[in-house]
Amino acid sequence: MLTPPQVAEAYFLESRHMLLEIAAYLDRYDAAVARGNHSNGNGNAKASNAATAEKKLDVIRRALAITSEAQPTKQRTLTLLELFAAPETKAPNP
Amino acid sequence: MQIIQPHYHAIARTAQDYERMAMSGVVAVAEPAFWAGFDRKYPETFIDYFRQISEFEPTRAAQYGIRHFCWVAVNPKESEDPILTREVLRQMPEFFEKPTVLGVGETGLHKSTKNECDSLEAHVDLAMKHGQLVLIHTPHLADKAHGTRRVLEVLAGMNVDRQRIWIDHVEEQTIRPCLDAGYWVGMTLYPITKCSPKRAVDLLELYGTERMLVNSSADWGPSDPFTLQECVLEYRRRGHSLQEAVEVFHNNPCRFLGQNPKFDIPQIRIDTVAPGSTKPVCS
């Protein structure tokens, strides 16, 4: 088993990389919103797609808040999996 | 789709990588001189290394139909030794005469020390005197922003042709000042420690495609030459046309590297041919 400094060292760059990818994902979303191309379709469909997209992003933002908790009451991964499995946030099955 | 890998450390990679690159559309690679993982002590070691990348490596690439070009330099880590650097620089011009050497690179900064800055200046000066292209490495991770600023400061104090200089490994925090100053920039795709294929496409969408190069570097460390193909896929997946992809991943390397006439690969234009005809629908 690794010591705390070993864990911090071994997975630092990988975690940095994953955080940058998430930040880029959120920036990409904001840029798309700024360009105004939510999707094709009529007004109602566009509004519905925009609302669905915003809901997904909200789940990610909540997940980030859970991830950054310094002293969580239970494992962060467990809380995140519960969040992603909740009926209002669940992703469709492929 | 034909693509060019403009920064590739071939001697650190296997023949299988060449084969798989050829099968995935790579028609040419350009190999900058690199750090060997340890600091070399002797100028002669560099000279043999330059012979390897300018004489032997093109023959290995040719077995897979890939054109191999290269650059020569003392890389930033080893340029901390000014005596070694001076001696290698003295012998570099003989390599400018080789048929596949495109210029001076990768020079640049690692920790941005005075010796490194002096070496960068000497490399760029030599390149300009001999009409060579320049490829500049910028530091990794936490040193990147400061090191890139220092690179720009060193170059600003020199009489250089900015269109012939490529500043490599830019990321979100360093791309704008390099482009604004008139240089070419490169985004290097690494699995973990540099830019990622998705982020590179974000930057292409944000800053446009002019004076932009994308490469995998791919050395002896954790790296992957196929992050470049991953980037092509991501670019196309976002709705950019085949011609737009060709402009970024083939024609831009032709535009920059082709400033040296030794790089003679022409740009590509995709045409659609009407059924039953050999003539393009439109040109």
Image: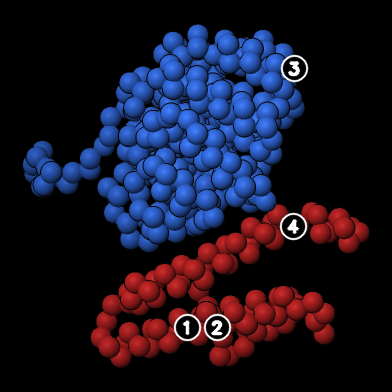
Q: Dot 3 corresponds to which residue?
A: B41
> Is A45 in front, or is A23?
A23
Q: Dot 1 corresponds to which residue?
A: A54
**Tag 1: Cα neighbours inside 10 Å, few (<14), some, or many (≥20)?**
few
Distance between the alpha carbons at the discs numbered 1 and 2: 6 Å
Nearer the camera: disc 3 or disc 2: 3
Task: Find residue B265 and report its image quarter.
Answer: top left
Sequence-earlier tag: 1 or 4? 4
**Chain whose colour in the figure is red:** A
Q: Dot 2 corresponds to which residue?
A: A58
Q: Amino acid at mark 1?
A: Glu
Distance between the alpha carbons at the discs numbered 3 and 2: 56 Å
**Tag 4: Cα neighbours inside 10 Å, few (<14), some, or many (≥20)?**
few
**Chain whose colour in the figure is blue:** B
Q: Are marks 3 and 2 on the same chain?
A: no
The location of residue B20, given as percent across then percent down, is 49, 36
* Chain for numbered disc 3: B
